[in-house]
Image (cartoon, grey):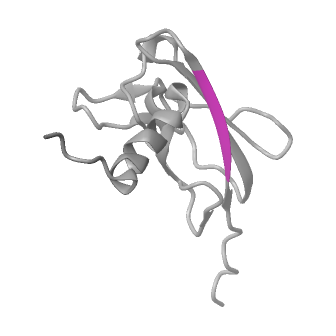
Amino acid sequence: PALPVSPSRTSVPLAALLLPLPLLFHLRLVRAEPAPNATLATPPAAVRLWLSQRPELGVTTVRILDARGQALPTGALTRAEAANAPIVVPLTRPPAAGRYTVRWRTMARDGHVVEGAFAFTVAAPAAAAR
């Protein structure tokens, strides 16, 4: 005889099927350094982005904008071969105190273009001790 199916045993797998597939599989930002909304005591030397999938680096852009919308000068984007390696955006000079917005755009191997933005702040240096 067949075993009865308990509704509690099927409810979790069925709920997972109701989620939109793009939300489960599309590339997304997992982590960043500086972290979104972070306030830093010292300026970063680079911005690092960890994504949920390996992006196509040749079509990836990352811009770091100051409060006036001016892009900071950066070096070439790099990414190590390791599966979970971040995209690294070196800053050619340390940013001054202020709020910055990181705008990124890339394409996953499936051809979907994904973009996002987050901000961080570099705190004003403390007055020099006299």
Q: Is residue 102 left or right of residue 98?
A: left
Residue 88 makes an appearance in the image: yes
In percent of the image, x 53 and y 54: which residue is there? 34
Residue occupying image coordinates x 40% and y 13%: 109
Residue 62 drawn in magenta? no
- Classify the position of the N terminus by image quarter: top left
Q: Position of residue 121 (x, y in %)?
A: 68, 59
Residue 7, x across and y down, in percent: 40, 52
Residue 7 against residue 48 in the figure, above or below: below
Q: Depth check: give the residue in front, 21 or 95.
A: 21
Magenta segment = 114-119
Q: Residue at x 51, y 12 (%)?
A: 59
Q: x and y percent of residue 95 in the render? A: 64, 49
Q: Could you tell whether 5 is left or right of 120 in the image?
A: left
Q: Residue furthest bottom?
A: 130
Q: Quadrant of the C terminus?
A: bottom right
Main secondary-structure element of the magenta-colored stretch: strand
Residue 109 against residue 10 in the figure, above or below = above
Please indicate, yes or no, whether residue 103 appears anywhere in the rendered image: no
- The residue drawn where x is 53% and y is 36% is 19
Q: Reply above or below: 53 against 119.
A: above
Q: How many marks?
A: 0
**Farthest left residue in view:** 1
Going by the image, does 100 lie left or right of 80? Answer: right
Q: Nearer the viewer, residue 79 or 96?
A: 79
Depth check, front residue: 130 or 25: 25
49 or 9: nearer the viewer: 9
Q: Which residue is outermost to the right?
A: 68
* Depicted 26 relative to depicted 16: above or below: above
